[in-house]
Image: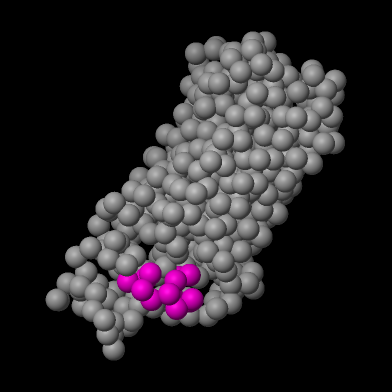
């Protein structure tokens, strides 16, 4: 009886309709996820005015969702490895859609913060699950590009907020952008019906018929016989998906550095997501002009993610990631000193590419670093622990804003995180990465397939 490694088959598969389906759902999930997270930054000036709160209180309100994001990334990402990714994606969509809409019904900072915290659980849970899902189904030669393309959806969500916020807030108040965020709950039945389960999940639960059908969709020309059994690689055979596996097989120090890199990357992202509109307003720009900078920032993020993914599939992704962190630190420092509006748009574009774009690339790197069996757990914990930086960012920048420091010092404070992130990635042992080992190894299953 032949034992076929399903992940070896997936890695060598040609891009087809199943890949497009997974890519579609993963991108769409991050578009709505990005919208849900970005609306606070766009609506923050109006919320501050409507609730009569200062910058420090507003920073705490923005951080409430990020506390939920941290817990959601850790726990819901881990639960996806146990109970299946499609189900946990639906749980996340229900949480962030319903409770973001509920935030629009609140009138005080406490109730707003509570609803945003619960919504944050779903927002955080989606990120590691879709990263793991796309990484697992992607052909080896396209993996980094496809994962970063998925995360470009996150920036599309931010752009949608910037494009719609001015009209919605101006006509119907800040609550309207929150009500619109409730619509994705309608997608849940379609996700359940069409999103495939993880191959690792099917192998572990002995769901052989479903696995055979999935393999036929993944590799249509692979001759599946009744006497063949599908299995994951040797690193997947343990049923233990607990956090301790992230520190086994020489990964302990690298896992810690991955967490530090995520903390600094997410610090930069959420400092800008929460305060870019307000900081641009402080520089003398109107709400409409400030939101234009948000659009340019997110377009830059998409460009950075695509460029980083393209480079990551061709050269060492670790080196690409280090370079992006450094460029982000430099570009942020330049923002406070750039006086020309045209030049500032260029700098903001580069900042988007090298901060949010960098974080999207970091998710792709983490998605390939851990073995399939603990991929959602690994990315989930990196994303979850990294949220410490995300939580600190809006509060710290809110405090700096309240001190009325020169604008350039606010941006330089954000940029320091980029240098720390570059150092952390430098210290990760890339030889321990699962994707590195996978590309170095021979693939018997594919060789047998080619010989048939």
175 versus 235 height, above or below: above
Residue 238 visible: yes
Q: Residue at x 57, y 26 (%)?
A: 161
Q: How is the image coloured?
A: one colour
Q: Residue at x 66, y 16 (%)?
A: 172
Query: What's the magenta bit mostly, secondary-structure-wise?
Result: helix
Give the position of the C terminus as an image quadrant: bottom left
Residue 179, horizontal then vertical, whole percent: 64, 29
Residue 54, horizontal then vertical, whole percent: 84, 24
Q: How many marks?
A: 0
Q: Residue at x 73, y 34 (%)?
A: 103
Residue 121, horizontal then vertical, whole percent: 68, 49
Residue stretch in magenta? 200-212
**What residue occupies the far bottom of the structure in this picture?**
1
Nearer to us in this view, 110 or 260: 110
Q: Residue at x 56, y 74 (%)?
A: 250
**What residue occupies the far left of the structure in this picture?**
452
Give the position of the N terminus as an image quadrant: bottom left
Residue 422 visible: no
Residue 23, horizontal then vertical, whole percent: 39, 48
Reply yes or no: does residue 425 show up in magenta: no
399 versus 51 height, above or below: below
Reply yes or no: does residue 202 show up in magenta: yes
Q: Quadrant of residue 44?
A: top right
115 versus 21 height, above or below: above
Question: Would you say 103 lies left or right of 35 here?
Answer: right
């Amino acid at each position: 009886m032949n034992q076929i490694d399903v992940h070896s088959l997936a890695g060598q598969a040609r891009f087809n309709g199943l890949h497009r389906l997974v890519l579609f759902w993963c991108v769409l999930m991050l578009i709505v996820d990005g919208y849900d997270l970005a609306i606070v930054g766009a609506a923050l000036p109006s919320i501050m005015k409507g609730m009569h709160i200062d910058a420090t209180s507003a920073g705490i309100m923005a951080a409430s969702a990020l506390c939920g994001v941290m817990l959601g990334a850790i726990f819901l990402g881990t639960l996806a490895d146990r109970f299946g990714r499609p189900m946990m994606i639906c749980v996340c969509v229900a949480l962030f859609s319903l409770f973001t809409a509920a935030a629009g019904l609140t009138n005080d900072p406490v109730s707003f913060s509570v609803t945003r915290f619960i919504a944050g659980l779903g927002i955080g849970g989606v990120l590691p699950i879709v990263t793991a899902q796309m990484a697992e189904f992607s052909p080896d030669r396209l993996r980094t590009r496809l994962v970063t393309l998925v995360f470009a959806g996150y920036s599309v969500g931010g752009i949608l907020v910037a494009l719609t916020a001015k009209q919605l807030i101006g006509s119907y108040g800040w609550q309207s952008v929150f009500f619109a965020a409730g619509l994705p709950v309608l997608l849940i039945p379609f996700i359940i019906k069409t999103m495939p389960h993880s191959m690792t999940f099917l192998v572990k639960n002995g769901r052989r018929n479903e696995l055979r059908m999935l393999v036929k969709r993944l590799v249509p020309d692979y001759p599946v016989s009744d006497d063949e059994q599908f299995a994951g690689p040797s690193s997947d055979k343990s049923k233990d998906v607990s956090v301790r596996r992230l520190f086994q097989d020489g990964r302990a120090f690298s896992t810690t550095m991955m967490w530090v890199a995520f903390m600094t990357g997410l610090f930069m992202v959420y400092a800008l997501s929460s305060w870019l509109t307000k900081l641009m307003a402080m520089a003398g720009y109107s709400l409409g002009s400030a939101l234009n900078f948000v659009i340019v920032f997110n377009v830059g993020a998409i460009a950075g993610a695509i460029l980083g993914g393209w480079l990551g599939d061709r050269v060492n992704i670790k080196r690409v990631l280090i370079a992006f962190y450094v460029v982000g630190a430099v570009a942020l420092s330049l923002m406070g000193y750039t006086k020309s509006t045209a030049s500032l748009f260029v700098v903001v574009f580069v900042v988007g590419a090298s901060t949010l774009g960098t974080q999207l690339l970091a998710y792709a790197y983490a998605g390939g670093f851990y073995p399939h069996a603990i991929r959602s757990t690994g990315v989930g914990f990196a994303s979850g622990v990294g949220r410490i930086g995300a939580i600190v960012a809006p509060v710290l920048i809110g405090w700096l804003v309240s001190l009325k420091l020169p604008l350039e010092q606010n941006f330089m404070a954000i940029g320091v995180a980029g240098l720390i992130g570059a150092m952390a990635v430098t210290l990760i042992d890339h030889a321990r990465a699962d994707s590195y080992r996978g590309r170095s190894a021979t693939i018997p299953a594919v060789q047998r397939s080619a010989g048939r």
